[in-house]
Image: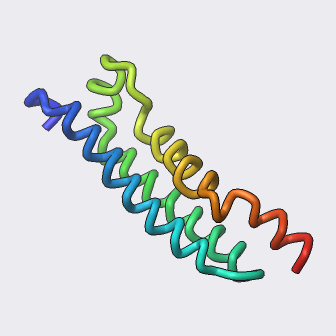
Amino acid sequence: MVLHKFGEKFYSGLVATMTAHLKEISKSIEAAQGGPFLEELNRRWNDHNKALQMIRDILMYMDRTFVLSTHKTPVHYLGLNLWKDNVIYSSNIEKRPLNTHFWN
């Protein structure tokens, strides 16, 4: 797709797909209470990192060509930023680790 000038469409689709997936993950983390909350957060973070490594490896060509020439965020950093924006900064998650750790 990148070779045939569909890089922008592919990259936008990647962002949309990852964002939708992370919003679902955020919901499952939000649903966990007490100690299981931190366990779920940690499990989902580890799963996200493994998936992100595979996605980065598969899309290495896009990173070296399209992303570089258009000054977009590289795939790995994109995944980290999307995790931060959609999971960590989720209004129902942002303050919970501190509360869960110290008050339960």
> Residue at position x 75%, y 66% from top?
96
- Count of residue discs: 0
The percent position of residue 29, horizontal first and vertical second, equals 59, 72
> Residue at position x 28%, y 33% from top?
62
Residue 52 drawn above or below residue 12: below
- Judged left or right of residue 3, residue 71 is right
The percent position of residue 74, horizontal first and vertical second, equals 42, 33
Query: Residue at the left extreme?
Result: 4
Nearer-the-camera pick, 78 or 59: 78
Residue 51 drawn above or below residue 27: above
Q: Quadrant of the N terminus?
A: top left
- Judged left or right of residue 66, residue 87 is right
> Residue at position x 50%, y 38% from top?
77
- Judged left or right of residue 63, residue 37 is right
> Residue 21 is drawn in which quadrant?
bottom left
Q: Quadrant of the C terminus?
A: bottom right
The percent position of residue 8, horizontal first and vertical second, equals 22, 31
The percent position of residue 59, horizontal first and vertical second, equals 30, 42
Nearer-the-camera pick, 95 or 55: 95
- How is colour applied across the structure in the image? rainbow
Query: Residue at the front extreme?
Result: 91
> Residue at position x 31%, y 17% from top?
69
